[in-house]
Image: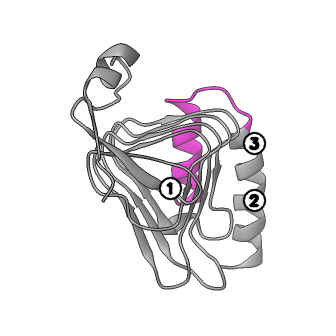
Amino acid sequence: MNIARDIFNRVLHIIVRFSPGAMTIRPLLHKIRGVKIHGKVFIGDDVYIENAHPECVEISNEAQFAPRTMIMAHYRGTGRVLIGEKVWVGPACVIAASAGQTLTIGEAAVLAAGSVVTKDIPAYTFVGGVPAKPIATVTVPMLMDTPLDEFKKGLIPIKKK
């Protein structure tokens, strides 16, 4: 990446983190930065999406990110982060891919607040903790219009072995 583009991306990233428009302005500005965004997504306040290599992050339709989430697609080299459709990421989560790794969060997966994700998350799985571990199977995706009680009733606990 040339230095002018790098500076542009970093300045735009600062602007987008504090701009209004979780479903309009923020996704648009992240697309301009190079993040691959498909369909409608929700990007909460102060969400950090890969500064140095935004093109290494791909977000699918109906994904939602609560405030203060961090998505990093590099650690001592670039990796990739793929966020599936209908994924819900709670506040203050960290999603980090290492060099050469493609980290995938499967369709309708849910990350509890404060989770740290460094390994793939299967589709329809509720995870939490540091590092994130499976807690339950998701039967009711956490969409914009899903009542919390309905989501919670649809969780099937994963029995520990």
Eyeballing the image, is 103 above or below 87? Answer: below
Residue appearing at x 33%, y 19% in the figure: 146
| Residue 29 falls inside the magenta stretch | yes
Q: Nearer the viewer, residue 73 or 111?
A: 111
Eyeballing the image, is 78 above or below 24? Answer: below
Q: Quadrant of the N terminus?
A: bottom right
Q: Nearer the viewer, residue 157 or 80?
A: 157
Looking at marks 3 and 1 on the same chain, the residue that comes earlier in the sequence is marked by 3
Which region of the structure is painted magenta? Answer: 18-35
The circle on residue 15 is: 3
The amino acid type, in three-letter code, at marker 1 is: Ala
Give the residue number, with chain letter if any, for mark 2: 10
Q: Residues under labels 3 and 2: Cα distance?
A: 9 Å
Q: Residues under labels 3 and 1: Cα distance?
A: 30 Å
The circle on residue 132 is: 1
The amino acid type, in three-letter code, at marker 2 is: Arg
Which percent across, then down, holds residue 123? 26, 52
Looking at marks 3 and 2 on the same chain, the residue that comes earlier in the sequence is marked by 2
